[in-house]
Amino acid sequence: MSITSKMTPEIYRYVKACGKRSLIETKPSVINKHTKLSYSKQSQIPKYTKQEIDAAKKRYNRSSYINDVLRTGKIYSPDTNELICTLDYGIQTAPLLKNTVVYRGITPPKGGFTPETLQKYFYDNNGFISTSPSQDCAKLFKDTYKHKGILMKINIKQAPALKVCDAEWLFGRNFLKNFTHKKINDELYEFNQII
């Protein structure tokens, strides 16, 4: 097992930006007492080609397992880190959506929704945020055979979004941190971006 198999995406980006294969090969100028690297995030973001971004979108579209990995906080494999970093870069460099409405369906967890689970799904979500310009498409991800889920109507003033396919737009991790929401009814919440 290589050393790079035990890194978070942030450390992986740093190592990759340095052109190295492991953290041991890098010489960070400062490591603080919490073992976080000190560097300029903008200068350390690896660049990816359109082909690499397209390949990452296809992989994500086939299986969004990556969100399960991100939400659990596990240490990631080099392959998973590469996928996360490619999608991060693709979203950061994507065209801005302006004055747009997208939708997201959320399947209810076991035990239903509580204020704590809503906080987790809405604001403490470390995964990528999959949305759709189609309300009908988003509704397909909302309900289970026994329980009604939630439909999120997201009003975007301006944000970069990666088009995965015609029915899916992908936003960055923790994207909804800059939004407020109001409950319309038990199955519909409306979000408004704060700029």
Image: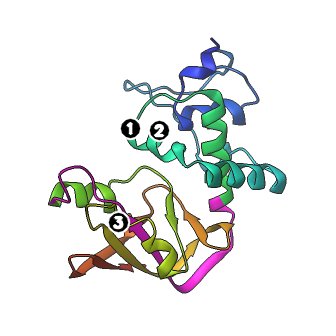
Write down the region rendered in magenta: 91-114
Give the residue at mark 2.
Answer: 69
Point out residue 158 in the picture as x, y percentages from the top left corner.
54, 79
Query: Given the image, on which type of amino acid does mark 1 rest?
Result: Thr
Residue positioned 72% across, 31% down in the render: 18
Q: Quadrant of residue 82?
A: top right
Q: Badges 1 and 2: C-beta atoms under 8 Å apart?
A: yes
Give the residue at mark 3.
Answer: 143
Q: Earlier in the sequence, mark 2 or mark 3?
A: 2
Q: What is the secondary structure assignment of the residue under circle 1?
A: helix
Q: Nearer the viewer, residue 173 or 11?
A: 173
Q: What is the secondary structure assignment of the residue under circle 2?
A: helix
Relative to 16, say whether 91 is above or below.
below
Relative to 61, say whether 41 is above or below.
above
Q: Is residue 96 left or right of residue 181?
A: right
Residue 72's disc number: 1
Q: Nearer the viewer, residue 55 or 73?
A: 55
Residue positioned 45% across, 30% down in the render: 36
Counting other residues with Cα less than 10 Å from the Cα at mark 3, is it few (<14), some (14-19), or many (20 or more)? some
Could you give the CA–CA distance between mark 1 and mark 3, rounded to whole angstroms?
A: 23 Å
Q: Quadrant of residue 23?
A: top right
Q: Is residue 141 left or right of residue 19?
A: left
Q: Nearer the viewer, residue 55 or 13?
A: 55
Counting other residues with Cα less than 10 Å from the Cα at mark 2, is it few (<14), some (14-19), or many (20 or more)? some
Could you give the CA–CA distance between mark 1 and mark 2, rounded to whole angstroms?
A: 5 Å
